[in-house]
Amino acid sequence: DAGVIQSPRHEVTEMGQEVTLRCKPISGHNSLFWYRQTMMRGLELLIYFNNNVPIDDSGMPEDRFSAKMPNASFSTLKIQPSEPRDSAVYFCATSEGAGGTEAFFGQGTRLTVV
Amino acid sequence: GESVGLHLPTLSVQEGDNSIINCAYSNSASDYFIWYKQESGKGPQFIIDIRSNMDKRQGQRVTVLLNKTVKHLSLQIAATQPGDSAVYFCAESNDYKLSFGAGTTVTVRA
């Protein structure tokens, strides 16, 4: 298995533009997490899906952020409109079962909003 | 609120020596603890985990110790190698949520 695959690896966009980050989970993993990493705040959980259903989105910063998981093989994190303070590395992680045990992380998407 | 934190932000260790990375946690209800390693430009990588009903767990060159009395977690790396240079995070789990500490940067000196 190639692991958790995220795209793009790097994204530079102008303030106000829409940004879509993509994640392909490990086959058979039914828990999916989106994290954001910054120097100031470290790793923060944004949203958690189990069996494609959003279970906890309390970490989503505001309405500009949305996430979907239309099937077991794909998830997106969208920011619209993007702002410079959204600049961070966004990670997707997946695990077997309903918990976060031994979560496998993707390589991340480094987002820069100018 | 509850938090997971690390005692030291950086650790410099001579190649071949043993490394000890410490972590304090405050949520006594956490049932599962994990150590992750993050190399530059990569996502966190699972190293080893331990459940709250255990005191010690060993892996390949790594040992995790859990002291619930003082809410302390440590990661020991035996015979540290250059490839061990990275940022190490402890995380605690409650149900599905992983809460990460700030991270300790380990630098291995040749």
Image: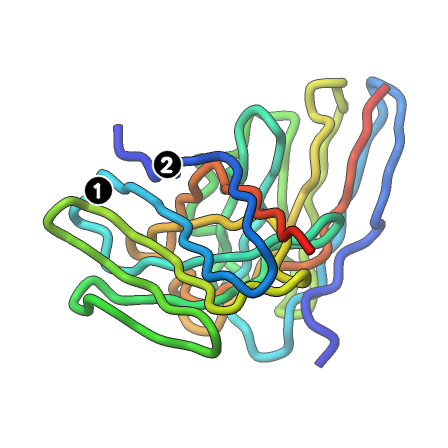
Q: As displayed, is residue A48 above or below residue A37?
A: below
Q: Name the image colouring.
A: rainbow
Query: Which residue is depicted at the point 17% across and 49% down?
Result: B29
**SS at circle 1:** loop
* Residue B7's disc number: 2
Q: Secondary structure at mark 2?
A: loop
Looking at this view, name the residue that lies furthest to the left: B69
Q: From where the camera sits, is residue B71 visible?
A: yes
Q: Residue flagged by tag 1: what amino acid is it?
A: Asn
**In the foreground, A23 or B93:** B93
Circle 2 crowding by C-alpha within 10 Å: few under 14, some 14–19, many from 20: some
The residue depicted at 51 percent of the width and 63 percent of the height is A103
- The relative height of residue A53 versus residue B79 in the rendered view (above or below) is above
For the C terminus of chain A, the image quarter is top right
Numbered label attached to residue B27: 1
Which of pointers 2 and 1 lies earlier in the amino acid sequence?
2
